Image (tube, rainbow, N blue to C red):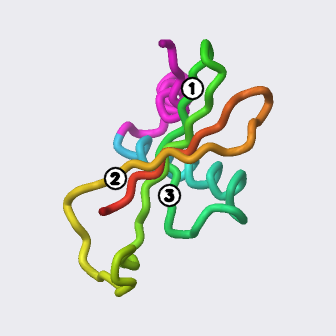
Amino acid sequence: MESTRLSERLHEHLAASTTLPAEVQPAWVQGTLEVVGKFLYGLSVPSTWRLVDVQRFDQEKVLVCHWISTSEQAVCGACHTISHRRKKTYLVRRLQDLPASGLTVYHAVKANR
């Protein structure tokens, strides 16, 4: 299963074509991913989600956007009270989006339990 991660491609591009210091490159890659996420999904994705990476599986024709939730609070599904504490356990949810350019699009959202 061959896949391509956008962050890896950005790192390779920076290493080959720029004299940007190595300690600055990860911040540049993260900033580029945030711009891409806001451009593509700025009006439809909650503002507490941050795009971490985009992964493309060529053989299966699948595109997976990896998001992380930065929310500090959540509503309990059982008692509907607001929780202000962050747990150390995470849950990854996969949501299917509409197809784009012939690719099946999924969003993998990592959030606190």
Please give the name of the residue rendered at 25% of the width and 71% of the height, measured from the top-left corner: 86
Residue at image x 34%, y 43%?
A: 23
User: At label 2, which amino acid type do we have?
Assistant: Leu
Q: Nearer the viewer, residue 39 or 17?
A: 39
What residue sits right under mark 2 in the picture?
91
Q: Which mark is residue 8?
A: none
State the CA–CA distance, disc 2 to disc 3. Answer: 15 Å
**Residue where numbered disc 3 is placed:** 50
Q: Secondary structure at mark 2?
A: strand
What secondary structure is found at the residue carrying circle 1? Answer: helix
Q: Amino acid at mark 1?
A: Ser
Q: In the shown orientation, is residue 105 left or right of residue 29?
A: right
Query: Is residue 72 visible to the viewer in this orientation of the structure?
Result: no
Q: Is residue 111 above or below residue 84?
A: above
Instruction: Please state the horizontal and vertical placement of residue 63, each as a whole percent of the image.
Output: 61, 32
Q: Is residue 75 magenta?
A: no
Badges 3 and 1: C-beta atoms under 8 Å apart? no
Label 3 CA crowd tier, 10 Å (few <14, some 14–19, many 20+):
many
Decide: marks 2, 1 in contact (CB < 8 A)?
Answer: no
The residue that mark 1 highlights is 17
Indicate the quadrant containing the C terminus: top left, top right, bottom left or bottom right: bottom left
The segment highlighted magenta reads 1-22
Placement of 38 over or under 7, stated as above or below: below
Q: Residue furthest front?
A: 78
N-terminal-most mark, 2 or 1: 1
Please name which of the two marks, 3 or 1, marks the residue nearer to the observer: 3
| Mark 2 burial class by Cα count in 10 Å: few <14, some 14-19, many 20+ | few
The mark that comes first in sequence, 2 or 3, is 3
Identify whether 86 is placed above or below 80.
above
Q: Position of residue 8 (x, y in %)?
A: 47, 28
Q: Position of residue 103 (x, y in %)?
A: 71, 28
Which residue is pictured at 30% across the width and 81% down the height?
Answer: 83
